[in-house]
Image (cartoon, grey):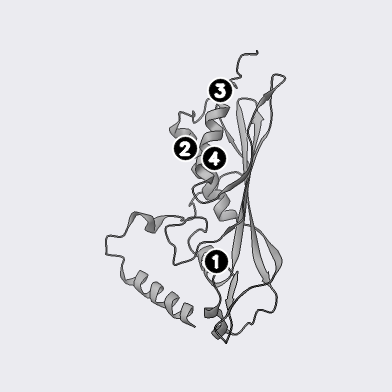
């Protein structure tokens, strides 16, 4: 009940503050207005700079778990792959975090425990690369969790600790995570952010560039 009251107050304030000068992070995490292809083809020559820009984009909100960089083996570029640790989705009380896009995704992560994992593939193509971004959503499955609204304010948002009626705190038993499919809005925001970073590094908008391989040893 407490969380619902706080949520109501936040929404009420947001409606009446359109004339105020808001902090810069207020617009962060907004879903993109234009949809682009995923995987997206980018025309870029330097695979090391490309990989650095992808890492910089992803680790703004996610901690990287595994990183297999694009490499040259026997004169051929290999596919790169990046995967993050699962991250508990940010709520309406954390507007500066952008791992949950604004609107439904932010609200859902406020009312339920949602986590997201990002997987990025970089596939060399003639004249550039195909970059695929996949965001996997999962809902926490708790054992013995009561469903009445009055009980929600006694649960930490991430669902790891629980306060019992006698005041003691116990670990919440987790059965696992229920797959919810892909977060298409966040995929779009990430892939468009990567493209914007590459454009700032000099990626041409139209003309294809040859792949730049390092000299053979």
Q: Earlier in the sequence, mark 2 or mark 1?
A: 1
The image shows residue 26, relative to residue 143, as above or below, that is above
Q: Nearer the viewer, mark 3 or mark 2?
A: 2
Q: Are marks 3 and 2 in contact (CB under 8 Å)?
A: no
Secondary structure at badge 1 equals: helix
The image shows residue 166, relative to residue 174, as above or below, that is below
Which residue: 42% across, 57% down? Answer: 96
Mark drawn on residue 109? 1
**Which residue position holds label 4?**
55
**Which residue position holds label 3?**
209
Q: CA distance from mark 4 to mark 1?
A: 24 Å
Q: Describe residue 104's horizontal placement relative to residue 138 as left or right.
A: left
Q: CA distance from mark 3 to mark 1?
A: 41 Å
Q: Describe residue 81's horizontal placement relative to residue 59 as left or right.
A: right
Q: Quadrant of the C terminus?
A: top right
Q: CA distance from mark 3 to mark 2?
A: 17 Å
The image shows residue 172, relative to residue 95, as above or below, that is below
Mark drawn on residue 197? 2
The quarter of the picture where residue 169 lies is bottom right
Secondary structure at badge 3 equals: loop
Q: Nearer the viewer, mark 2 or mark 1?
A: 1
Secondary structure at badge 2 equals: helix
Neighbor class of circle 4 (other Cα within 10 Å; few <14, some 14-19, many 20+) is some
Secondary structure at badge 4 equals: helix
Mark drawn on residue 13? none
Q: Earlier in the sequence, mark 3 or mark 4?
A: 4
Which residue: 62% across, 55% down? Answer: 86
Q: Nearer the viewer, mark 2 or mark 4?
A: 4
Q: CA distance from mark 2 to mark 4?
A: 11 Å
Q: Earlier in the sequence, mark 3 or mark 1?
A: 1
Q: Nearer the viewer, mark 3 or mark 1?
A: 1
């Amino acid at each position: 009940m407490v969380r619902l009251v706080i949520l109501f107050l936040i929404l009420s304030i947001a409606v009446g503050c359109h004339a105020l000068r808001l902090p810069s992070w207020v617009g962060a995490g907004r879903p993109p207005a234009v949809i682009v292809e995923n995987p997206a083809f980018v025309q870029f020559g330097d695979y090391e700079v490309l990989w650095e820009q992808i890492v910089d984009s992803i680790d703004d909100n996610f901690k990287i778990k595994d990183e297999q960089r694009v490499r040259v083996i026997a004169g051929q570029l290999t596919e790169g792959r990046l995967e993050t640790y699962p991250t508990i989705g940010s709520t309406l009380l954390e507007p500066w975090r952008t791992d949950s896009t604004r609107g439904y995704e932010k609200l859902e992560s406020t009312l339920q425990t949602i986590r997201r994992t990002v997987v990025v593939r970089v596939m060399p193509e003639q004249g550039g690369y195909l970059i695929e971004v996949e965001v996997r959503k999962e809902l926490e499955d708790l054992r013995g969790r009561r469903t009445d609204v009055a009980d929600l304010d006694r649960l930490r948002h991430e669902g790891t600790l629980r306060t019992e009626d006698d005041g003691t705190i116990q670990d919440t038993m987790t059965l696992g995570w229920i797959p919810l499919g892909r977060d298409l809005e966040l995929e779009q925001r990430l892939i468009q952010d990567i493209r914007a970073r590459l454009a700032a590094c000099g990626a041409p908008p139209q003309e294809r560039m040859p792949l730049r391989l390092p000299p053979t040893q």
